[in-house]
Each structure stands twice: as structure tokens, then as C-alpha cells.
Amino acid sequence: MLEIWTEKYRPKNLDEVVGQKTVIPRLKSYVKSGNMPHLLFAGPAGVGKTTCAIALAKEFFGENWRNNFYELNASDERGIDVVRVNIKEYARTAPIGGAPFKIIFLDEADALTSDAQAALRRTMEKYSRTCRFILSCNYSSKIIEPIQSRCAVFRFTRPSEEEIMEYLQRIVKGEGIDIDEEALRQIAYVSEGDVRKAVNTLQVAASFSEGKKITLKTIFEATAMADPEDIKNMVGKAMNGDFIEARKILDKLLIDQGLSGEDIIKAIHRVVIDEPGIKEEKKIALLERIGEADFRIVEGSNPRIQLEALLAAFALI
Ligand SMILES: Nc1ncnc2c1ncn2[C@@H]1O[C@H](COP(=O)(O)OP(=O)(O)O)[C@@H](O)[C@H]1O
Ligand SMILES: [Mg+2]
């Protein structure tokens, strides 16, 4: 059976979590004291919110942590009924096996309607003797104020490229993968701080390479991603007024490699942002044009025409 690496290599304790340098010590201090308040984990996807909730449960409850840990996803079972029925049912019974409390982990809590949040708030108060809530969300501003003020708020941030590399190296070692350093760095770079995405990309590349060495090229092929060198080249040619050459590269990306207009625009955007050789005023003008082309492509306009128009605009700027 195919094992999913995000699960296989999910950190087993708080020490294995990468990044989150302000979060981890605070969580550990709860474990040390044997108690914790309700918690609110806010931050982007794939940076360790669920992982930390599970790790906390393991540290508090030990081997049988599952007995006292209840996870539900607010966006699957949206609305007030979930809070009324499921959570209450679970919250009202005593913790099992002498644990000091149970943990209810409510993922994507910002998907709850404000009515459901109000009901949740009452439940949190009523059962706070036996239950601790951990709410996770992308934006804490979407959680009603009375809940926020009852929780200790933790802001999860995107781990750095180095931190993601460190984590990927563990998997590389564990799986005995043969991979170039620059390929691994590329995975960390394109994941933009989303560790889940980085792990999934590594797994796709590994299955794509069928045991052979994973190179930078493997990554581009496996992920249907534009090679930044091609994009840099294309943008450079366009900016130097060599429109014909720029267009040739565009054709290669669109036709030979079958990349989508949206993927190419995204790659152009990143190259322009990261390229130190482009002056600030120029960057601003380019970004504005990129934004416009992106919008039009998303709205269903012909990607090839839009990308050609973009290259033409680059030549004029
Ligand atoms: N900070 C991190 N340290 C180590 N692995 C991480 C981290 N964040 C995410 N991961 C990896 O990504 C997977 C998904 O992380 P998860 O905690 O579920 O993210 P989310 O913040 O979306 O809840 C984990 O199983 C793990 O493999
Ligand atoms: Mg999660």
C-alpha cells in the first residue's frame, strides 16, 4: 500500500516540529505545568497546526491519547448543529483513564457561522472543567471576539526554506532517496512555506523518478512546473525587446511542455519579484501588467493571447 509521507513523517512530538519558534516553548510550558487553557491556533495551511494539537495530546495523555482527543473539522460539518450535538455529547463525559481533561480539536473553526461560534462559546464555558478546546483557523479575525478572549492565541508562521529543507532531509534519509541538493532546495522554494505541499511534492517526484536520482529536471517534469531559468530567459528577452525569441520560449512552455497559462503567469510573477536585476519602478509597472493578465486568464480569456500581450508590454516598459 502506498504510504502518505505527510502522515508517516508527521512529527511525533513538539521537538520534531520545525519553525514555530515562539509557539513551541509556550506549548511545552503547558505540558510541564500539567494544564492548559483553551487555545486558538491561527496561521496558513500546512505549517503544523494540526500536528501541534496532536503532539500536545500525546504529551499530555501518553500512549492512549486518542481516548481523550476528539478531532472534528468545522468546514465538513458546517453549522450550529455540530456544535450543539457532536461537541456537547463529547464534552459532557468525564476524561478517560485519569486524564486531567479531554481535548477537542476543532479544525477550520473560521468556517463556523457566527451563530455556531456563539453556541460554541457557551459550550466552552460550560465544560471548561473537563474539556480544553483547541481551535484552528487561517485568520483569527474570523473568530468572534468572546471566543478569542477565552483562548490563548498562537500565531503559526511559514517555516523558512532552511527549516523546510531540514524536515525534507529527514524524509530523504528515512526513505533512502537519491536527490540533488538543488532539487531539494527547489522543492522548499516552490512550497512557499507550506510544509505539507513540500512533502507531497517530494513524494510525487520520488515516485516519478522510479528510484533514479532526482534532479532539478525531475522536479519540473513531475510537478508540471515551469523551469525558472526558462521564465527568466523569456522575461529577459522580452525586456530587451527581443520579442520573437521571447515568444519562442513561451511556445515551448505552452505547447511542448503543456503548462497552463495560470502556471506560467505565477512563475513570471515570482521571477519578477525575486529578480534583483530589475529596478523598483520597472518592477511596479511589470507587476501591474502581470496582475491584469492573470485576472483576464482566470476570467477565461485566451491565455496565449494574454501572455503574448504581456511579453509585448514587457518589451515596451
Ligand atoms: N512545522 C512543521 N514541522 C514539521 N512538519 C510539518 C510542519 N508543518 C507541517 N508539517 C508537515 O505537513 C503535514 C501537515 O501539517 P499540519 O500540521 O496538518 O498542517 P496545518 O497547519 O494545515 O494543520 C504534517 O503531517 C507534516 O508532515
Ligand atoms: Mg490542519
Image (cartoon, helix red, strand yellow):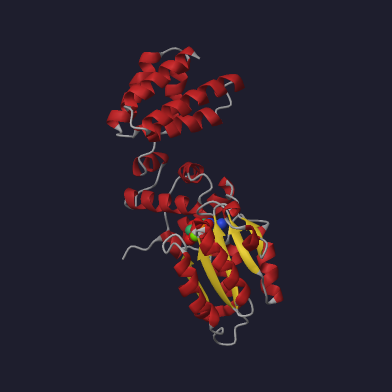
Q: Residue furthest front?
A: 115
Q: Name the quarter where the N terminus is drawn.
A: bottom left
Residue at 49% x, 57% y is 111
Residue at 62% x, 65% y is 39
The answer to whether residue 128 is above or below residue 112 is: below
The answer to whether 189 appears left or right of 244 in the picture is right
Residue 6 x %, y %: 45, 60
Q: In which quarter of the image is residue 151?
A: bottom right
Residue 283 x %, y %: 56, 23
Residue 142 x %, y %: 57, 53
The answer to whether 146 appears left or right of 114 in the picture is right
- Is residue 114 visible from the viewing direction of this image? yes
Residue 278 x %, y %: 56, 22
From the viewer's side, name the closer residue of 36 and 129.
129
Q: In which quarter of the image is residue 298?
A: top left
Mark count: 0
The answer to whether 279 appears left or right of 209 in the picture is right
The answer to whether residue 293 is above or below residue 76 is: above
Q: Residue furthest left?
A: 255
From the viewer's side, name the closer residue of 241 and 94.
94
Residue at 54% x, 72% y is 104
- Is residue 13 visible from the viewing direction of this image? no
